[in-house]
Image: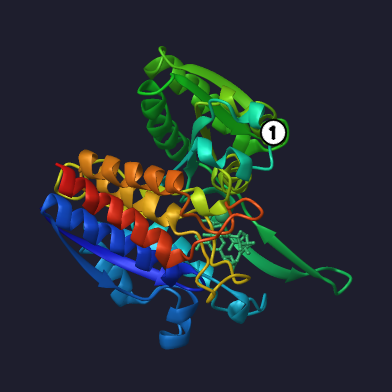
Amino acid sequence: MHAVITALPGDGIGPEVVAEGMRVLRAVGTRFGHTFEIREALIGGCAIDATGTALPDETLHLCRESDAVLLGAVGGPKWDNPEAPVRPEQGLLGIRKALGLFANLRPVTLHPRLIAASPLRPERLQGVDLLVVRELTGGIYFGEKGRDTTMDGGESAYDECVYTSAEIERIVRVAATLARNRRKKLTSVDKANVLETSRLWRSVTTRLMRAEFPDVQIEHMLVDACAMHLIRRPMDFDVIVTENMFGDILTDEASMLAGSMGMLPSASLGAPGNNGRGTQMGLYEPIHGSAPDIAGKGIANPLATILSVALLLRHSLGLEDEARAVETAVWRTLEEGIITGDIAMPGERSATTTEVGAAVAAWIEREEARS
Ligand code: NAD
Ligand code: IPM
Ligand code: MN
């Protein structure tokens, strides 16, 4: 297969982890005989510095011409002035919206080797295998926002949260379809005791599940309670579907089930079959940010990005064997003990970002030698 991938390294540790993602992609190409043409472009703070905007037209154009996009992270202290008119995060939100990527899949699985890396007690982590489906192009992130002055001369600000029934239906359909192929349990998370958008979310979800997914068990949960249940009894969750901001917050929390922020990949997808291959054009990125506290040190965990490459192979290129080969190589690397500091035990040797990427690539190529 010949596929065109746009790489958007971004800021902070973004370029460090995307370099390892690309290394793994090349190893997959070598082993399975594919050519992956990788084109790099600017997004986020580095794009602001070079062009004055966080999402240059050229970047968007390249992404539209690609089979898939691999993104690192955007943002950092250099661009953190809250009064600045342009912000790195606008690039990320802009590309998700422009490409129509409304469904953000964030799988949470735990390698047994990393049980000790989690702050939770080992017995709480038995059987953790969940998938958060986060709505990505609606809600409070994309509502009208602004600043005002108050009657007494003070300042005010507002962010509007809007959801339409069509937006709710399409994301719940994605999540329920995924649940149907897993343990057939869907937890819809909202704040229906307070928010009108959540009450619409709950009604639409109830109606749609009854009509289209009678074989999938549905439960509704308030987001505050969900935050608690996620660490009290994480093994009870199969698929969680929720709105944009709740999904953002709950997945940083859920990353602790997997040992580190550096372990969770994500896939952002639009309508099925939108790329002419019968698969989906998508954007793949770790859930973590640019980690300014460790950027430039070569110690960031690249596995979230490498596991995002596996999702890219699976969802946008339809290459299931190749995706599994990447996931297996990641597991072998963990078992070998080649791990970065965020998941290493006290006293255990920490590997660098590059060492981990090279080890995963080597496993992929080594299996070639065996077959
Ligand atoms: P962060 O995710 O960058 O970092 C949170 C903590 O997790 C830090 O201690 C960091 O060192 C650690 N961490 C994150 N990724 C890691 C990795 N791969 N390996 C080891 N440790 C890792 O969140 P933050 O510090 O709140 O945000 C920093 C910047 O990143 C902000 O500008 C924010 O807007 C941006 N951000 C971007 C994205 C994205 O591009 N998708 C996501 C989240 C945050
Ligand atoms: C994420 C990030 C982004 C989000 C920010 C950087 C805009 O936190 O991808 O999880 O909130 O969606
Ligand atoms: Mn986030």
Q: Nearer the viewer, residue 9 or 297?
A: 297
Q: Nearer the viewer, residue 143 or 63?
A: 63
Q: Position of residue 238 (x, y in %)?
A: 50, 26
Q: Is residue 236 left or right of residue 45?
A: right
Q: Quadrant of ligand 3?
A: bottom right
Q: Is residue 325 above or below residue 33?
A: above
Question: Would you identify the image quadrant in which residue 347 lies?
Answer: bottom right
Amino acid at the residue labelled 1: Arg
Q: Which residue is mark 1?
A: 121
Q: Is residue 338 above or below residue 253?
A: below
Q: Is residue 343 left or right of residue 359?
A: right
- Judged from this view, the residue extending furthest toward the top is 215
Q: Residues within 10 Å of mark 1 (few under 14, many from 20)?
A: few
**Element type at marker 1?**
loop
Q: Position of residue 141 (x, y in %)?
A: 56, 55
Residue in view at x 55 percent, y 26 percent: 237
Residue in view at x 17 percent, y 48 percent: 368
Q: Is residue 4 above or below residue 177?
A: below
Residue in view at x 41 percent, y 25 percent: 179
Q: Is residue 109 left or right of residue 309?
A: right
Q: Position of residue 178 (x, y in %)?
A: 38, 29
* Residue 260 in view of the camera: yes
Q: Is residue 338 left or right of residue 68?
A: right
Q: Nearer the viewer, residue 51 or 309?
A: 309
Image quarter of the C terminus: top left
